[in-house]
Amino acid sequence: MLATGLFILMAVVYVVMMYLLKNNPQKWMEYVRAFSEAGMVGALADWFAVTALFKYPLGIKIPHTNLITNNKDSLGENLGNFVTTNFLTPDTIRPYIDKLSISEYLNDWLSKDKNQQLIYNECSKIIQRIISNLDDESIAEFLAIKGFELTSEIRLEKLAATSLLYLLEQNEHDRLLNIILPQAQHYVENNRELIYKKVVEKQPILGLIGGKSVTNQLISGITTFLEEIEKNPNHDIRKAVTLKLYQVVEDLNEKDDWQEKFDQIKEEFITKEKLYEYTKDIWLRLKEDMLKKLSDRNATFNQYIKQNIQQMIVSFREDKTMQENIDKYARQYVYKMVLKNSNEVGKIITNTVQKWDGTELSEKMELEVGKDLQYIRINGTLVGGLVGLLIYTLTHLFL
């Protein structure tokens, strides 16, 4: 409005001066007329220049006008090249990248309780999601196959021999005898009548010649014998049992018939089908238990996750070497990525500008910078008027 108002003012002054010069001419009027005339020319010229940037003046398609709309594609290309050439160069980006401190940001972020809680919540959710989405059939089948492969490779007779040898070296067989012998004595004493009946069944004649007395003597002899074995750690029976067990260990390691027996046991009881049933049942119970514990905030498993997260945060804060390495790698990565993709950034700018609607772009730019451009018209009016006044003055002074 100000720029257009000045143009109108120059036009009005010019008309008034022309009228006065015809009816009551004065010398000073010529100077005012020259100023207003040149001001109108300057105002119109700069109006044309400003308008030609954004649209066709008066809607007339004059060549080299409506510049932004008509040159939108080249504008985008030049803008992309300008950004790439002047902003995304090693010399321009290095000072900023050298100041990049990811560790400082992480330390600040991790120091806040809400962020620590966020990490814990997200870790818990991720673990729950992973466990929930696992294919139970595939897991069970995988475990069954691996279990079958493992048991196929295991020599059960060797395992049995090693286990038995360990028990012998630890004198576990003596401890077992010490447990069994008192129980055996107790059983014999409490079942005298049953033993008598069994003896009479085998030898009926004993029932006629005092079988109970013979049976009692037999039972007393058995209990005394068992008691001697129990109380004497070097008893011959103990030694015989030990030697026999060592012989079993040797047989397990050397005789093929033991391997055949254990292989037969494996073929009968350890099959893929049975292992699949076992592993599926175990996995489903384990999965249910894990999900239940993950849902309980106070469960030991969740507390373990939380403690590990806190320990990780503390370790990160105290580990200056790790922080320096993180910053170093981050800077190198960003530096390489920026340089590697600098041309892509230029292409993005170019393609983005080229996709814009030319008329809309022109209108937006006019709204952003139009007010400032109006001062060109104002200055054109005033400067044009002053130049016109100067030319007129010099002309009349020297010509």
Image: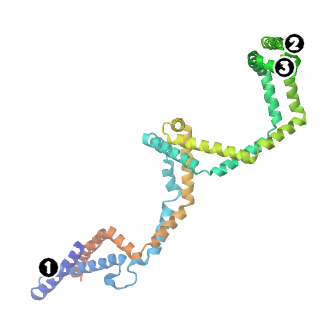
Q: CA distance from mark 1 to mark 2?
A: 173 Å
Q: Which residue is mark 2?
A: 209
Give the image quarter of residue 274. top right
Category of crowding for the residue at label 2, using alpha-carbon neighbours closer than 10 angstroms: few (below 14), some (14–19), many (at least 20)? few
Nearer the observer: mark 3 or 1; the answer is: 3
- If you read the primary sequence from the N terminus, does the residue marked by circle 3 or circle 1 appear first? 1
Q: Residue 179 is drawn in which quadrant? A: top right
Which of pointers 2 and 3 indicates the residue nearer the eye?
2
Residues 53 and 278: in front is: 278
Q: Which mark is residue 200?
A: 3
Q: In this rendered view, identify the residue nearer to me: 68 or 134.
A: 134
* Residue 260 % position (x, y): 87, 39
Residue type pointed to by label 3: Val
* Residue kind at label 1, given as amino acid type: Trp
Q: Are marks 2 and 3 in contact (CB under 8 Å)?
A: no
Q: In this rendering, would 89 be left or right of 61?
A: right
Does residue 84 appear in this view? Answer: yes
Mark pair 2, 3: CA separation: 11 Å
Circle 1 sits on which residue? 28
Residue extending furthest toward the bottom: 22
Q: Which one is earlier in the sequence, the residue at label 2 or at label 3?
A: 3
Horizontal arrangement in the rendering, residue 32 relative to residue 46 (left or right): left
Q: How many circles with numbers are drawn on the protein?
A: 3
Residue 310 locus on image (x, y percent) = 50, 36
Residue 245, labelled with which disc?
A: none
Where's the N terminus, which quadrant? bottom left
* Front-most of residues 297 and 313: 297
Task: Tell us which disc is closer to us: 1 or 2.
Answer: 2
Separation of disc 3 and disc 1 at Cα?
164 Å
Residue 244: % across, % down = 87, 23
Q: Quadrant of the C terminus?
A: bottom left
